[in-house]
Amino acid sequence: MRFHHTIVVLAWLTLTPLHGQDTPSDQPNLVAMTAQDEAIDTYREHLIFLAHPALEGRLPGERGCAIAEEMISTTFRQLGLDSPESLTDYRDSFEFRQGGRFGSNADSKVVTGNNICAVLPGQGGLEDEWVILGAHHDHLGRGEFGSRSPDGQIHEGADDNASGTAAVLLAAGLLRDIFIDDGGPRRSILFITFSGEESGLNGSRHYAEDPVVPLSQTTAMINLDMVGRLVDDEIQLTGHGSGKGFNQIVTGVDADSTLKIRKGESLTSRSDHASFYDKGVPVLFLTATVFSDDYHTSRDDASRINFEGGANAAILAAELVRRLAVSSDSPVFTEIEGMTSAGDGPSFSDIKIRFGIKPGNYGDLEPGILVSGVSPGTSAQDGGVLTGDIMVRWNGRAIDDVRAWMGMMAEHEPGDVVTVTVLRDDSEIDLPIMLKPK
């Protein structure tokens, strides 16, 4: 019965491309040209499909995620976008381990993930350079791992990250329409929706190691994650410091949008752009300014989505991609101080200290934070934290997850000394650590 319901949902989806935008590539701002009501309707249809209970939380390796991937590739096909020559029917397949505590082998299993990729070819001498727009399409299924409320219910993942995937699909239609009859020079655009993000950025890491188009020819990557519950018409943009020249691209991009861009100087390592940043590709990250309490719970459903805000985020992303595609110059990669710090979350911008670790998994059922990397010269390194440690307590308080830990850090000033308890080789070790400023 559930499978029949899923097929009905798939048949129900209809694509609504945006027509009538026969516009040259030097148009001042795509934001001002878009028929917003039509864009919102298209965005809503995409998101409601992806977050439908019949897809059972889009867990990689399960039927619901496969249906989501078929919907994404079908949408790209209906838009007339090409499948990359190296792929079969838009799919870039890979294997990874999913589930278990912190991705350990003990309770995990090997599953096949599929990144879904589509191409809008460039022209005029810039076609061999690329701009990537991406988002992850997977979620947690029924929350067997990664859930903050493991109640066995379907975790629909409407905001995380049907919202970002729907935005990529809408942006793809907008960019297809604006460039369809344009004869000017522009870079090629690669649209990607990643699998396996929730188990540790597996899809984007796979891509970064075995890219469909050379990373040396990739001008920039823009990532959308959790843009479905924007508050007060605000959206956070970070990563502009990773590319010299980004600021010129970004300036004025929100002039005709109802959204207000809040630029952050730091950059979290907890979403798919991090895999590209680690390879020296300039990145931009769009997300909400307020972190929802429904994150990684069964409450993250479509009834709570701000569809207008999500559609506007897609339009904004499309304009950023358009500018990058037609610009005579491309951003030059620059390292961002504090990139590997987990204390860069959007709802804790007032954190005054930098700890200096990269979380390996930020949503496990078990409490604690796996340390997948330690930055040199930081509080964590000076205090003796090692890659592979699991941080379980902060001044005696249990660390449930990254979000809770960020709240703990927000309570401190530079110069404070805290005791961090780590699990190392099955033994607990207390480390006194002096906190350094950002």
Image: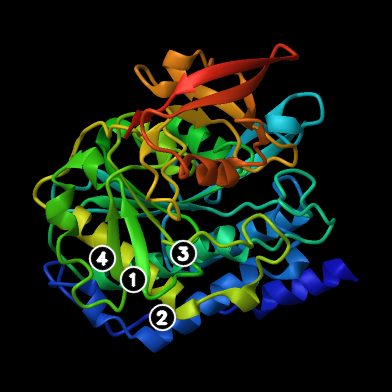
Q: Are marks 4 and 1 in contact (CB under 8 Å)?
A: yes
The residue tagged 4 is: 319
The amino acid pointed to by label 3 is Val
The residue tagged 1 is: 315
C-alpha distance separating marks 4 and 2: 14 Å
What percent of the width, then of the height, locates residue 100? 77, 33
In this rendering, does residue 191 appear at all? no
The residue tagged 3 is: 227
Q: Are marks 2 and 1 in contact (CB under 8 Å)?
A: yes
Residue found at x 26% / y 31%: 335
Pick the front one: 91 or 197:
197
On the rendered structure, is 383 left or right of 198? left
Pick the front one: 102 or 181:
102
What percent of the width, then of the height, locates residue 373? 49, 22
Q: Locate residue 294: give its quadrant.
A: bottom right
Q: Which sits earlier in the primary sequence, circle 1 or circle 3? A: 3
C-alpha distance separating marks 4 and 3: 16 Å
Q: Which sits earlier in the primary sequence, circle 4 or circle 2? A: 2
Chosen colour scheme: rainbow
